[in-house]
Amino acid sequence: MSTPQTLQLSLGPVLFYWTRERYADFYREAADWPVEIVYLGESVCSRRRDMKLDDWLGIGRELAESGKQVVLSSQTLIESEADLRDLRKLCDNGEFSVEANDQSALQRLSAARVPFVAGAALNLYNPTTLTVLARVGMQRWNAPVEMSRDDLARLLADCRAEGLDHPCEVFAYGHLPLAWSSRCFTARRYQKPKDRCQFVCQKHPEGLALRSQESREVFTLNGIQTLSGACQDLRHEVPSMQEMGVGVARLSPRAEGMAEVVAAFDAARRGDLPAPDPLALIDAEICDGYWHGRPGMDNTRSASQS
């Protein structure tokens, strides 16, 4: 058997609503982190207007000068003509490739034969679909976040059998993006209408925890997006990812402690793994259920040590 290739690490787009200063500080630090790919842009809510396309392009140029591959992420839920106008500008930026997170972006990019990354929200489950997308410019694709390790291994094997060798990216760390809605649940929490939300989600730079009656964090509310309550943490699965042929492990940014997360995954891909720990890298519950074919909120490391 051939030696497994070293995974690349990517920083996904910031899913939460931060201030311009926090974005600038975060990416200034990220320029020195051992990640090869950085995704930029607002992929959740069009009302988050602090950062314009030119701002993201400026950050992208600085990161590119530091040797990073920069990708601009498109909005996942397109709701208006204004959203479509912004999407067209993003796809036509002329500098960086784009992550297509909905069918509108996919149509725009494929029609123009512009190389793109297929986002996890496109729900790609079979080699036939991946082959079609590869013909129209797909360079890399993201596995659906709920896909198990065994299902992904079969899919990757099927892709290789059909001669499709485009890199696969796996969501390896962070609150799992589960759903998007035309309603803003964070605004609802503050009893404000969506179109006059006063940007209350900026008060929660790592999202708003939604707890069950038993005080378990079931979900994380992030404006119109619903995320998992716990953070997925697959650093101890890095060896199996490499063996399967996964090309990229995606780390979703957090407001605090992200340098530590990146360092831990960088060590893991170099074979330096500590003993499994049921606790998170930073102060958060962890989960890995989907990866093991179980309910997504399960923590198999904790269960194995109980």
Image (tube, grey):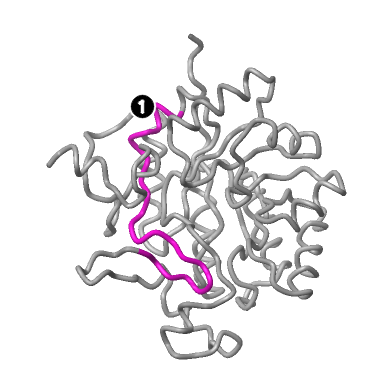
In the rendered image, the residue lying farthest to the right is 112
| Residue 227 lies in the magenta-colored region | yes
In the rendered image, the residue lying farthest to the top is 1
Instruction: Magenta stretch: give its range.
Output: 219-241
Pointer 1: what residue? Answer: 271
Most foreground residue, 163 or 198:
163
Dividing the picture into quarters, in which one does residue 206 lie? bottom left
Most foreground residue, 164 or 294:
294
Question: What secondary structure is marked by label 1?
Answer: loop
Q: Residue 222 at what x, y percent from top left?
A: 47, 70
Residue type indicated by callout 1: Gly
Number of disc labels: 1
Relative to residue 111, is residue 73 drawn left or right? left
Q: Residue 161 at what x, y percent from top left?
A: 63, 17
What residue is shown at x 81% (from left), y 63% (from top)? 88
10 Å crowding of disc 1: few (<14), some (14-19), many (20+): few
What residue is shown at x 53% (from left), y 61% (from top)? 14
Q: Residue 86 at what x, y percent from top left?
A: 76, 69
